[in-house]
Amino acid sequence: MKCLLIASESAEVLFHWTDSEFQQNVQEQYGASQEEGQGLPAFEDSISTLFAPIIISCSTMVDRLGDSYTSFITESNHIYVLHQFDECLYIAVNGDGEEGEDDLKRKIYVMKKMIEVLFGMVTLSSNLLRKELRPQDTEQRARLWKHLQSLLETYSQLRENDQSFLVEAVERLIHPTLCEQCIEFLERRLVQQLNSSAERAGEEVLHAFILVHTKLLAFYSSRSASTLSTSDLLALIIMAQEMYPSNVDLEETGPEDIDSTSGSGHESFYTPEPSPTDKDSNSSEMPVRGSTPVFEFIDPDIQMAEDSLQTLEVPPPDASTPRRVFLDVSSKDGLYPMMPHSMYCLQLWPGITLVLLTKIPTNAVAMSVYTFLEAFAKLEKRLREGHEGSAATRGQLTIHDIRNKLDKFIKALGPSEIQSAHLQNVWTEFKNRAFSRGGPGLNKDLIPWCRNMKTQLCGIYRQCFLNSASADVPRHLSTGLQERAQTMVQEKLMDWKDFLLVKSKRNITMVSYPCIALDPADLTYLEEFPGLIHFICVDRSTGQMIAPSLNITERTTSELGKGPVAQFIKGKVWSLVGTTRHFLRKGYSTVTLRDGDFYFCYFLWFENETGYKLEAGEIPVLPDESAPIGMLAWDYYRKLLRYYSKNHQGEVVKCYELLTVHLGVIPTEIILQHCRQLASKLWEPSRNPLL
Amino acid sequence: MAELVPPDSLRCNYFFLYDGSKVKGEGDPTRDGICYFYPEETPLDKQELLCGQLAGVGRCVSELSSSPVRILRLRRIKYAIQMKDQFFWALGCSVDVPTVSVCQFLDQLINLFCFYNGSVRQSYQLHSRETLAARWAQYLSHIQSGSSELQHIFSCLKTIDSTNVDPLLLLKAALILQACQRCPLVLAGCILFRGRVVSTQMSPELTMKVMVHESETYSKTQTCNGPSASSSFDSAVGSTTVFLTLSELQYLQSAPVDKGLSSHSTLQKDAPPKKTRLSRTLSDMASTESDSTEPDSIQSSQKMCFSPCFSDSDNSVLSPAPSQSTTNPPNSQSQSPKPSFSNRKQSQEAGEETLDESYYHSFHSSGGAGSRTQSEEDGSVFEGNSYLNGGGGGGDGDLAFETIFDIGEVESGKKESHDHQAVTGDCNSEGAQGVMAQHNPAPRSITFESPEESPLIAMTLYLHRVQSLVLALLVEPHFLSDTASMEEVYHSSLASLNGLEAHLRTISPVAPGAPEPYIFAHFDRIQSTLTTNLSGRPGGAQEHPFVRATSLLHSHFCNTETLQEAIIRSAGAAVYVTSSVAHETYFQQNRGSLRNSGIPNHQDSAFSLPSKARHRLLKHGVNLL
């Protein structure tokens, strides 16, 4: 019984996602009369009627008490989590006990993050966002909602099964040599070739990375690019997974592959021999270009939930058309959030994907729009606080600066196909009020006009970057160029393909991977740390994590045993992460728990660049309603690092987390010794050539 | 322990009871539904807003999930909700209070109301809103008053500081209670001193309820008569009607004390009654005594000191029984009905074959000896049935009620014959006790809150005050009209109470010695009692982090059954907690001793907390080994 709903203040449904059980529940409450309705609209009506009293009560509480609901829990443990972002109210419901309050809250924040990545600064204007999320055209609406629903499902799937989405950090494939080769290849061959091609239509490849399922094999950023934040990278991985989902079952079909790399064999030394038969066998698996990716989550629930949409099935967009994504860019003049990029997601083989991120030629417009938006937002804030006249513009670009720039900006827009007449009118009116001699000047009356200006600017931004359909000339890397890039990387990785697919499932394991690389005499984790069952180590400064794979399907026997046992331990690990976040939120950076037959440890600590461990400082206590701790939706750790660094000026501070699961019979002292060794070993520079 | 009340322990921000049945039509104003609103000075439109919105949203969510809302959280305040029978209760606390505690708080409040007033619906039919508002206010302030933040977190009983009291006094208190129980009209009792529990025979929940009345009369006598009021019969003794749920009554009636007595005394009729009684009290002493003091070590020390005193006369009866009931009271309860059951079965064998065995079993094993004697004394068959429905109904609610009623009818054919046998049998045993004469009880009143709910049975709470010491007994309603029993109970306990009071009064609070370099809190989950070396005074630099950590950990341990131990640490404080089915113990070492904070290191001082706790807490009678 799950549901996620976005509603406007007037109780209009802007988006909804439900699982089949919830849908059934709603339909039962509405009786048979609704079932014979025309699918989507009828169901949408029921949902909005059911939730309307909650939504309306919510806005009443905000208006009259200045407080809003955050959650309801019923006696049967149904959980409702509510959160309001501007004028959009998000409601997430769980009635099957699979998700807790924190999970639901996280889901809401992730949904918001995905919407930001997809719509950029349009999200800053509730009015426009409402239109964007709920297009009048039902067909268009169905397509959009289906896409969002699919993203949400992909995320939920990943959060439930993938450790990197559990802790919200990127997991890399641990294979130093291959990784290095690939990075070099991306840099010297691929990106260089693409950026020097005439077919790139003004776009410039900034980042290129190769994903094996959700794990990162290689990542390259061009010199002119700013760093891609972990938050954005994780969001992009979700999008890539949504486009080319990994089918968990299919990949389990090669037990012989697993045998060849597990056990005593040291994976680091695995070098595949390019056998002549390889080509033949692979050619059959090569995806035919243009073929539609099969939606591979054969989950009956998901199918059911989407039945309502089937009447409005829309052909998928052309695969060569890039996705428009909005990512944070930090340049030397400051941070520009939600700058437009194009995302090319090219499948090399099922499970292996090449992702290219390009800067689009009209990027500068977005930067200007953001500068103006920020200026008007600040002005509005100052006016609201009661400042008037020149005091209202203190501490920022002078209003006259903005005036000149905006005049130029509008002039520049003039000849293009972008409709800027509205903006121009509002701007003229604004100027009349603010600057003319007889006018009211800079005072409170200007507030609505500030808002109006912001809406108009968002409108321009929307026209420029979201209406890709209206542009006649396809402004993106040509199909031929994309194909060439794909073939290049395919050729490069051809011999490694099978190895990579297996490796991604058993990246490192407790039994097969030596603690210290490249020395066959070394012990495995299991040998070196007897009693250690599992661990996760996260470098929060880079947003990367290392953990032994948890294979929990029936077919694979991992060192955790088959199915249920592994599943049990997985459940424990998942709940441990939730628990430790709960304590971290309250300022506790060390937690140990003896739970049943297990002993859990959690540590968060700081180091300087040379690996010297720094004294723990006070960690801020967060209020209950703050955003969930993580890196995907809201980067808690970046804030934490900034907070901690205040007392360590001039020093590069790094932040690490370690979680371990031990057998309960192991003496605590030994467990703690293990933790210390793990903490120092895992991030030894030699161990991590990629950092 | 000194009674210091932190001023900020008032933690309820809002409490209201809203009656949805009063606001049905479109035009009905919301205020008609507001039965009680705290704080009372809240402007009416705000009251209406909160009641209307919360109740409305609550109903909507309940319908969507087909289950009543339990918790409703806003950004700045969280509400525990109860929805029952068109009534909507909401209790709002700051978001820092653990959710478990807020829910417990609300349940306590509603249960208190029902305990003293019976069904809520009926109370509102019988009494004016103003009268009942005063009662809600009284209960609300009672729960909030006089307890520290820690006590709020655990919703625990306030007990006297047992470490400071001679164990013999606790034994004495337990003996007084057991002596009172010799009167069959007395169900159970507790002894309170200055608003704190000395000894109790009731469940923690029930004891908590009883204490409200005590504190109320205490404050009255304080203001009217002064603390040194002479103990004339009239001013010292009082009573009030209270309402018990079926399960509470059952629990009381199935208490091991009754069973042991009736079977014992019927078997050993020749033995001098005094002696049997003494043996019984001793064997049960430990279990009642442990109600007020939890640490094992104290129990053992007590055993050591009382056995030389009593063993000369009763050595043979100081059997393994005490230790059994000490360690595991619930077990001994489930076993105890058996002897009486088999006894009766023997005496009633004659016409029982046709009776459904299972019905028979539930009927007899749940109705205690006390109820049995009652129904048998009762002349009319019908009266007997209705009594059993109230007193011995096995389950809660309608179903159990009806099945039992059916047995009654099946039985009624042969009832007369075997009733007769039973009466003679029991008369014998009562003769041996020599306490009760034949007696016609007044028909018991049973109130039903709603068809789905368990009925509430009217009982009487009898209070006997000796200065700051109070003996509170739950008695059958007709106890008050039975002068003989009342005098018996009064006179038999008066001297002992006086003595106990004199002793307890002379105990001076321990002078606060050098502050210990650690803080601990030991919560007994079964007795619902708390032992701590925390002064209760706010402002200690070490105390706030400890209380905060405790509150966090407590709610976490409530939600995770398999959890046994935890250490959490922030930059300034590390807290260790260990828990089992029976207890939760929290321990914090004071500042200045945290080393290597934060980094995984086995030399970190936080990880030495478990051994330190084990070592240090032995002194306080907390055994973690």
Image (spheres, helix red, strand yellow):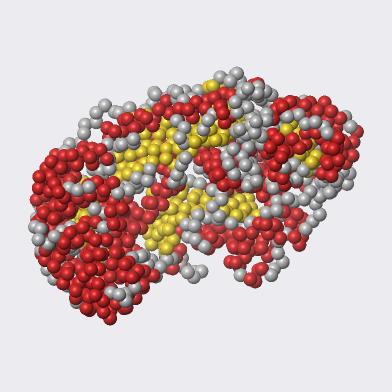
Rendered residue at 39%/70% (across/down): B399
Residue B243 drawn above or below residue A623? below
Image location (x, y in percent) of residue B320: 22, 47
Q: Quadrant of residue A457?
A: top right
Residue B13 seen in the current view: no
Image location (x, y in percent) of residue A21: 61, 59
Image quadrant containing the C terminus of chain B: top left
Q: Quadrant of residue B46?
A: bottom left
Q: Give the side of residue A586 with respect to residue B8, left or right.
A: right
Rendered residue at 63%/27% (across/down): A514
Q: Give the side of residue B609 with respect to residue A576, left or right.
A: left
Q: Give the side of residue B266 with respect to residue B412, left or right.
A: left
Residue placed most toward the observer, A310 or B118: A310
Residue A405 drawn above or below residue A158? above
Rendered residue at 32%/48% (across/down): B526
Q: Give the side of residue B42 with respect to residue A571, left or right.
A: left
Image quadrant containing the N terminus of chain B: top left
Residue B590 seen in the current view: yes
